[in-house]
Image (cartoon, helix red, strand yellow):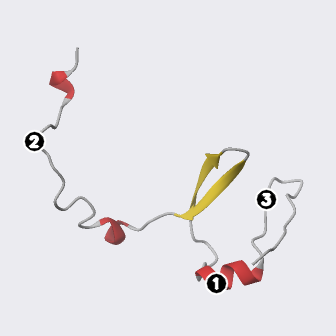
Amino acid sequence: MSATTTLSPKFQISIPKEVRQRFHWRAGQKFVVIPKGEGVLLLPEPEAKDLIGLTRGADTSDYRDRNDRY
């Protein structure tokens, strides 16, 4: 898939319809913009329910808190 768009005078970009449909993006959805080399990475902002269980099984034995700092 190759699609192009133009940056408006208000610094807005319209996402082409074929891209919106492919990723099921909707109006009002929030995104995270991450600088990456000469461009940016555009990712949908995850909802809280999508993050549940994300760290299940993580090793917390080497955890440091504010009191461990120099």
Circle 1 residues within 10 Å: few <14, some 14–19, many ≥20: few
Q: Closer to the camera: disc 3 or disc 2? A: 2
Q: Closer to the camera: disc 1 or disc 2? A: 2
Quarter assignment of residue 63: top left
Q: Position of residue 55 (x, y in %)?
A: 24, 58
Q: Is residue 55 above or below residue 19?
A: above
Q: Closer to the camera: disc 3 or disc 1? A: 1
The N terminus is located in which quarter?
bottom right
Alpha carbon separation for disc pair 3 and 2 = 46 Å
Mark seen at residue 61? 2
In this rendering, position of residue 54 left or right of residue 68: right
Image point 75% across, 71% down: which residue?
Answer: 15
Q: Position of residue 51 (x, y in %)?
A: 32, 65
Mark seen at residue 67? none
Callout count? 3
Image point 56% across, 63% down: which residue?
Answer: 43
Image point 10% across, 42% down: which residue?
Answer: 61
